[in-house]
Amino acid sequence: MKNKEKALLDIKNLNISYRTKNGEAKAVRDASITISQGEIIGIAGESGSGKSTLANAAARLLDKSAKVISGEIVFEDTDILKLTEAQMQSIRGAKIGMIFQNPASSFNPVYTIGNQIIEALTCHIKLTRKQAHDKAVIMLKTAGLENAEYIMKQYPHQLSGGMLQRAMIAMALMCSPKLLIADEATTALDASVQAQILRLLKDISIQENISIMFITHNLLALKQICDKIAVMYGGRIVETGSTDEIFTAPAHPYTRGLIDCMPDIGSHERYLKTLQGEPADILRVFKGCEFAERCPECMKICIKQKPPKTQLSENHFASCWMHCKAEVKISEQC
């Protein structure tokens, strides 16, 4: 049974910027999110919304051009932003595993799959080569690759995309991490393989009590495996809630827009719906809501002032002026 009471990862008021030739790009703005032990949380949003930056920050894998301006990333009661790189290396891979978007570019093409998986284990645990080999075979089978002995001897180019993704999951699980960060882990896969990988991640989370941060723009994928969802726009988390709450009672116009864009098999509409306008420019400084210019329900206050975070239920929060009627009335009278 999952224990969802203890916070495993607690990101608090995180702000991250990138240095660019055009100025400071604020990729993550005042983001706060908590992941409990054994919980699967989805991070949703369009490209450029800050999802991958948030994920990379949680594993201290940010690009050199990135800078954490403020905030905390507390993993197991330790703020990892204060750790040295040597200290972080003892956590990354051992307690925090990463599943990257494109496994074909993540594996070294000149080494066999077995060599690379074994290396991930021996970096953190003292085992003989035979012990490491045997565990790698077990992990590949856990990831759904029954012909594990054969896979161990293959090079990355000899495997399909789905097999490579399973091998990467096996590598991420080698040291029994407490948190898996999956950054667009199923994007490059076809629909049937994608469904298999999602079921695999769900099963692993339940069986091993592993927490998963699942980053994607695919809301259908989040609906299948996540316990709760955080929606990001313009670097800011605009809504969080249980998966049921997000899909049955979305409280932010951006969330509703994303859901409306999902394909509906039973619909007779010829074309998919789209969100009007362009994603927020992260080089800009916004006085009000980042989504205001694209929002069909935009009010004057939305342009002038940032909306407060409103609690709608025990675990459902949204940052939108539509839920602050009293404050809006006062603003309109001024």
Image (cartoon, rainbow, N blue to C red):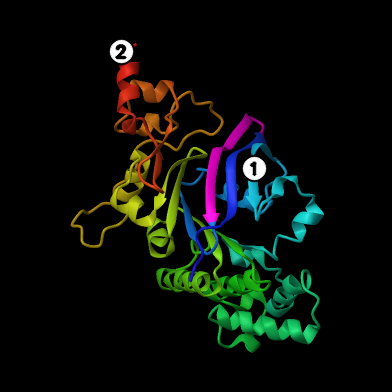
Where's residue 130, x and y in %?
77, 87
Which region shows up in magenta?
20-35
In the rendered structure, the answer to whether residue 14 lies left or right of residue 302 reads right
Residue 171 vertical position relative to residue 61 in the rendered view, above or below = below
Query: Secondary structure of the magenta portion, mostly?
Result: strand
Between 252 and 316, which is closer to the camera in this rendering?
A: 316
In the picture shown, does residue 123 fall above or below 5? below
Asked whether, in this view, residue 172 is left or right of residue 162, the answer is right
Q: Position of residue 159 (x, y in %)?
A: 59, 77
Please state which amino acid type lies under the numbered disc 1. Answer: Glu
Q: Secondary structure at mark 1?
A: strand
Query: Can residue 153 be seen in the rendering of this structure?
Result: no
Q: Mark 1 Cα within 10 Å, few/some/many (few <14, many 20+)?
A: many
Residue 197 visible at all: yes
Q: Quadrant of residue 170?
A: bottom right
Tag 1 residue: 72
- Residue 329 painted magenta: no
Residue 153 position, x and y percent, is 69, 84
Which label's residue is closer to the chain start, 2 or 1?
Answer: 1
Tell me which residue sits at (63%, 71%) in the image: 173
Give the residue type at disc 2: Gln
Q: In the rendered view of the protein, which quadrant contains the C terminus?
A: top left
Q: Secondary structure at mark 2?
A: helix
Whether residue 27 is in magenta: the answer is yes
Instruction: Point out which mark residue 333 bears.
Output: 2
Q: Nearer the viewer, residue 188 or 31?
A: 31
Q: Tell me what residue is drawn at x 68 percent, y 77 percent.
A: 113
Dot 2 crowding, Cα within 10 Å, few <14, some 14–19, many 20+: few
Is residue 323 shown left or right of residue 56? left
User: CA gap, disc 2 to disc 1?
Assistant: 39 Å
